[in-house]
Image (cartoon, helix red, strand yellow):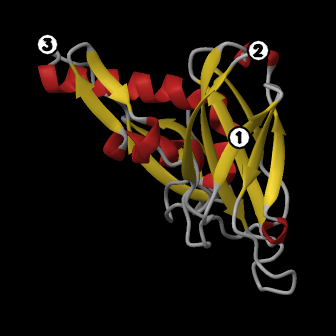
Amino acid sequence: MAKYQFGANGPFVGKLGNVVGCSWKGIPYLRSLPKKRAGKISVAEQANRDKFAIAQTWLKPLTPFLRIGFNAYSEKVEGFIAAKSYLMKNSMEQVATGFYINPEKVLLSYGTLDAPTQANVSVIEEKRLNFTWEPCARNASRAHDQAMLMAYCVEANEACYEIHGAFRCLGKAELVLSPNFKGKVIQVYLAFLAADRNRQSNSLYLGEVMVTG
């Protein structure tokens, strides 16, 4: 049963006939109830469902990172949903066994801020990652952008990350790795977040690293 909010002329929330009153970011809207499907699922529809499920599983451990990295992606879509949409359109490749996510084509952050340059990553004692990039002057306008560090082990379904890391002007940062990464391959990314938190850069893929030891 639907009910009015903010008086007789206000939006309603709940079911009314074949429509539902909803709200997104404080904006009221109506959507129709889903119809029962008649007929079989087509090959294209099943492929799209498979892609959706693979993207959902791959990105789930990265959710807090993506909320910041894909903030304000568009007027209507941001965060995890935006990251998943980008991944499905740009980062999936079809192989004989189904669909494969190419880590090199994945973005974990999207924005207009200057991306890292001359960036590299190395392993320290198999327990930490050392990130380096071209620093800027301490009095530069972007000096206090903060590094967003990501190490993702798809096999372990686990991610280690730092969203508010070292300043851009420092040119380096470290990230502690999970013990579960030992003997496994991890995917490494770097991005920057503005000091005012209103902008972020596209993430940069730094490659895969084998954690031995």
Distance in Å between CA atoms under marks 3 and 2: 51 Å
- Please state which amino acid type lies under the numbered disc 3: Lys
Say which element carries label 3: loop
Residue 38: give x, y in percent of width and height: 16, 16
Q: Which residue is mark 1?
A: 122
- Eye-nearest disc, 3 or 1: 1
- Residue drawn where x is 61% and y is 73% of the image: 114
Mark 1 or 2 closer to N-term? 1
Bin the neighbour count of mark 2 within 10 Å (Cα to Cα): few under 14, some 14-19, many 20 and up.
Answer: few
Distance in Å between CA atoms under marks 3 and 1: 50 Å
On screen, residue 116 versus residue 175, left or right, reads left
Q: Which residue is mark 2?
A: 213
Say which element carries label 1: strand
- Can you tell which quarter of the image residue 10 is in? bottom right
Nearer to us in this view, 170 or 156: 170
- Eye-nearest disc, 3 or 2: 2
Nearer to us in this view, 138 or 108: 138
What mark, if any, has residue 207 been given in the picture? none
Quadrant where the C terminus sits is top right
Q: Which residue is mark 3?
A: 40
On screen, residue 88 versus residue 154, left or right, reads left
Bin the neighbour count of mark 1 within 10 Å (Cα to Cα): few under 14, some 14-19, many 20 and up.
Answer: some
